[in-house]
Amino acid sequence: MRNVADLPLHGGHVPQWLARRMGKLTRLVLKLAVEEYGTRGLLERLSDPVWFQAFNNVIGMDWDSSGSTTVTAGMIKEALWKEELGVKVAGGKGKKSRATPEELKRIASLYDLDPEPYVRTSRLVAKVDTVALQTGYQLYHHVFLLDEEGNWAVIQQGMNKRERMARRFHWFNSETFTLNPHKAIAGLEKEFALNTVSREAKEYQKTLLDVVQESPMKIERELESLKAIANGYRPLVYYKPREPWEKDVIKRYESLGKFELNKRALEFARELSVSNYEEFLLLKGLGPSTLRALSLVLELVYDVHPSWKDPVTHPPDPFKFTYAVGGKDKIPFPIDKPAYDELISFLEELVSKHPKEKALVRNVTKITKNWKFPKWEKRPT
């Protein structure tokens, strides 16, 4: 059985007394992580929802709220800009996410890297999780981590306002952006998703690139015919209805939103003779509605299908990590300020210790590796 963690949308804020402690603890954990694993190792771990969730809970955030992503990522960004650890963060929540390209250029300049590949990657992963993979979540948070060696990771989050849930997308040094590209996806698994970046969608991608070389007017006529069929019209020629399958397909698309073509985007596709799916996704004006429309045409006219499998992965049971200092919303217990301050003092001393002494601490952690949480204390926030 696969387990998933849901991320309900939570409001509220972090009080100053807790934010100060979170900032100190975040910097200490990051220093130790880079010392132990290097910058690449840190990025690998942050792109793993298991490790990210543990980090989030250790600093005192709720285990299952949408704020666990935004607050933790914000703390990490602030800490890495204050510390010279060989890795920096661009982007953030809402308006801050739109500053990502300029911040990436600044980071690339610090590390003597060409910024353009990373700016393109930032745009592309956002397009994948908004357009190419559709599950009803709209992105509102995007952070891009880049180290001095050119390794990168992305943590972005989308919200579904109707269901009041969030979903987190993790990326790390992806070699492909169009075939199972994610490192992981944390969230509540849905019955289906319009997934055009699955390995099962290779034929779909190839056919779509062929179709968009045709006249946008022709594609629009095909779409309008399908809309008419959905409303009960049955043409005498050209299209043979496949009831009830066709109605099920149309309803599935309608559940994700409207399907309207942006003909200007399709004209760009023809003018530029796009030859791969990455180029297509980066087209100006290509949004979720247009891709839904094209996918519907491919399914019902050309009998070519995307994948409908939701690629969400399975974070571990998060309750194990909530017993460090408590949780902001008092789950499983209120923040224990003395314990929090003692932890900070311990780690401050550890940072200054000799490597042999740190090895002793690593051995101590093995003792607690198999600790199990008390099941009767499992309570969602």
Image (tube, rainbow, N blue to C red):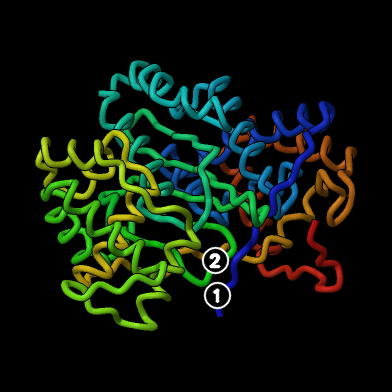
Residue 310 appears anywhere in the view: no
- The answer to which of 152 and 121 lies nearer the viewer is 121
Which residue is at 48% across, 58% downward?
256
Residue 245 position in % (x across, y down): 37, 81
Relative placement, left or right, of 250 versus 84 is left
Q: Are marks 1 and 2 in contact (CB under 8 Å)?
A: yes
* Mark 2: amino acid: His
Residue 212 position in % (x across, y down): 16, 50
From the image, which quarter does the C terminus lie in?
bottom right
Res 4 → quadrant: bottom right
Q: Which residue is mark 1?
A: 2
Relative placement, left or right, of 283 versus 188 is left
* Mark 1 crowd level (few <14, some 14–19, many ≥20, 10 Å Cα): few
- Considering only vertical position in the picture, is 299 above or below 65? below
Quick one: SS at disc 2? loop
Residue 184 position in % (x across, y down): 46, 57
Residue 333 position in % (x across, y down): 88, 53
Which residue is at 69% across, 54% downward?
8
From the image, which quarter does the N terminus lie in?
bottom right
Quick one: SS at disc 1? loop
Relative placement, left or right, of 256 versus 4 is left
- The answer to which of 263 and 23 lies nearer the viewer is 263
Q: Which residue is mark 2?
A: 314
* Mark 1: amino acid: Arg
- Considering only vertical position in the picture, is 98 above or below 211? above
Q: Report the disc number at residue 142.
A: none
* Mark 2 crowd level (few <14, some 14–19, many ≥20, 10 Å Cα): some
- The answer to which of 145 and 266 lies nearer the viewer is 266
Whichever of labels 1 and 2 marks the residue nearer the N terminus, that label is 1
Res 32 → quadrant: top right
- The answer to which of 342 and 378 lies nearer the viewer is 378
- Alpha carbon distance from label 1 to label 2: 6 Å
